[in-house]
Amino acid sequence: MQEQKIIRRGTIATVAFLGFVALGLFDDKLLGAIGSEALARSKQAFVYTVQIGIWLSGAAFLSMAINVVLWDRLVAHATGRPVPRLIKDFFTAIIFLVAITGIIGVVFEQSVVGIWATSGAVGVVLGLALKSMISDVFTGLALNVDRAFHIGDWIELRHRDTGDRVFGKVRDINWRTTHIELQNRTIAILPNSMVGSVGITNHSAPDPVARDELAVTLDFSVPPKRATRVLLAAVKAACGAGIVEQPEPQVLIKEVSALGTVYSVRYFLHLDEVTHAAARHLVHQSVLNHLSKAGITPAYPKQDLYTAPMPARHLDFHSQADRITLLRNIDLFGQSLAEDELAQLADSMRQRAYNAGEALIRQGERDHSMFILAEGLVEVMVAMDGRPELRVARLVPGECFGEMALLTGEPRSATVLSATDVVAFEVTKADMTALLAARPEIAETVSALIADRKIGTSKALQSAGAAERQEAARSLAEEILHSIKGFFQSVFSHAEGPRIVTH
């Protein structure tokens, strides 16, 4: 639509200019056809009209050509940004001022010097009367010359005295005002003189990826290494939807306050894809979720009086109760094991620590254990058909992986890498053998749970009916149970075969 409008205007300006030029070239022949008496009366007026038309239509044609060729093509393509309307209007005004001066000096043969002298005096009077408007115009020109910001940039204006701030996206810069679209989808129209008198932070320079941060205060009892691990995993898990993975997020100790240690969680966001407020919501949500999974609460004002040993404020996974809590939240164990069995597994499973970049398991290997992620963030990588590994998922605390290798002896179907420092618990075949030997019926519940989960995530069965899905779950549960019995042959060779139960 805008391009059609420009073409229409350019066509009108071109036709008008060529028409007046043609009239100027053939004016004698046209006037000669009118007759001698009419020629004497109208020749001078006709000549004035044609010459004025040539000057004004030529100015319009030149202005349109400069706008289309110079500003909209060359300059806009070179800078990658649209040229502000103020620049275009300024040069258009100069072109028409030259045209008017030409009309006065050439067409009417008047002294241009006298006119400029008179206009100078008038200009002083108008300047005093229009002081604020002139200030806005020239400040707008200065802003464009300094290139402090461009149309499409995200900027923050801060008043030097009051500290009030305006944050938004520059939509237009015209003769008097700058239009800024705020994050609430409204437009703030600010005089150019005001914009030029405040501090400006351009969040889109040198590129539209800007850093933001939020402060999280944790109790002194939380070791810094553990706090950094949990917070870094949280902010990395929030990446996506405008929060970028590169540059990488960081977690730094900002200060030590009366409440505890203040950590600065730093991340980068693409301002054209997500607002600061939305990004902070996502990061806060992820941080609170990871802290909750780790059993850590943000610091708050408190006063404790103890006449007995101080109770634990946070989960540290050294106590049996903390490990039972972790296991109970895993459906594979929480729905299949009794309390005494959970306690038995909590005592036998082993805590493992991994540095960022280490592999917890590797695709294709045959090691018979599974892992429960307690703290940190891991990435699931899959290599197919000889191609490089591709990340297919991220796992957060409270999730498990590797259960099929533990229960059926299958080779690992994926590689799991630690994206941050990680704390995980490993459940081995020996741990499961002890549980199944005491109660073989556990296998039927476990096989049904795994089958239900696989059927629930199967794309092929998403549109299937309830009966069809139940039959598929029963059949898959039988298959998994058969594999479990074969892998734990030493247990089931001495026990009665369990029944299949589907949920």
Image (tube, helix red, strand yellow):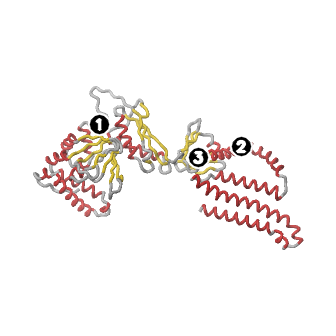
Q: Is residue 315 above or below residue 473?
A: above
In the image, residue 261 lies at what x, y percent? 40, 33
Q: Amino acid at mark 2?
A: Lys
Task: Give the CA separation, mark 3 to mark 1.
Answer: 50 Å
Q: Amino acid at mark 3?
A: Phe
Residue in the picture at 34% in, 51% down: 393
The residue that disc 3 covers is 149
In the image, residue 193 lies at what x, y percent? 65, 43
Indicate which label's residue lies in the foreground, 2 or 1. 1
Cβ atoms under marks 3 and 1 closer than 8 Å: no
Label 2 CA crowd tier, 10 Å (few <14, some 14–19, many 20+): few
Q: Which disc is residue 316 wearing?
A: 1
Label 3 CA crowd tier, 10 Å (few <14, some 14–19, many 20+): some
Q: Amino acid at mark 1?
A: Asp
The residue that disc 2 covers is 131
Residue in the picture at 16% in, 45% down: 434
Indicate which label's residue lies in the foreground, 2 or 3. 3
Q: Earlier in the sequence, mark 3 or mark 1?
A: 3
Task: Give the CA separation, mark 2 to mark 1.
Answer: 69 Å
Task: Give the CA separation, mark 2 to mark 3.
Answer: 25 Å
The secondary element bearing badge 3 is classed as: loop
Q: Earlier in the sequence, mark 2 or mark 1?
A: 2
Residue in the picture at 62% in, 44% down: 146
Q: Is residue 309 above or below residue 382?
A: above
In the image, residue 418 lies at what x, y percent? 33, 45
Q: Which disc is residue 213 wearing?
A: none
The secondary element bearing badge 1 is classed as: loop
Residue furthest left as drawn = 494
The secondary element bearing badge 2 is classed as: helix
Determine the image quadrant of residue 251.
top left
Q: Is residue 477 left or right of residue 122?
A: left
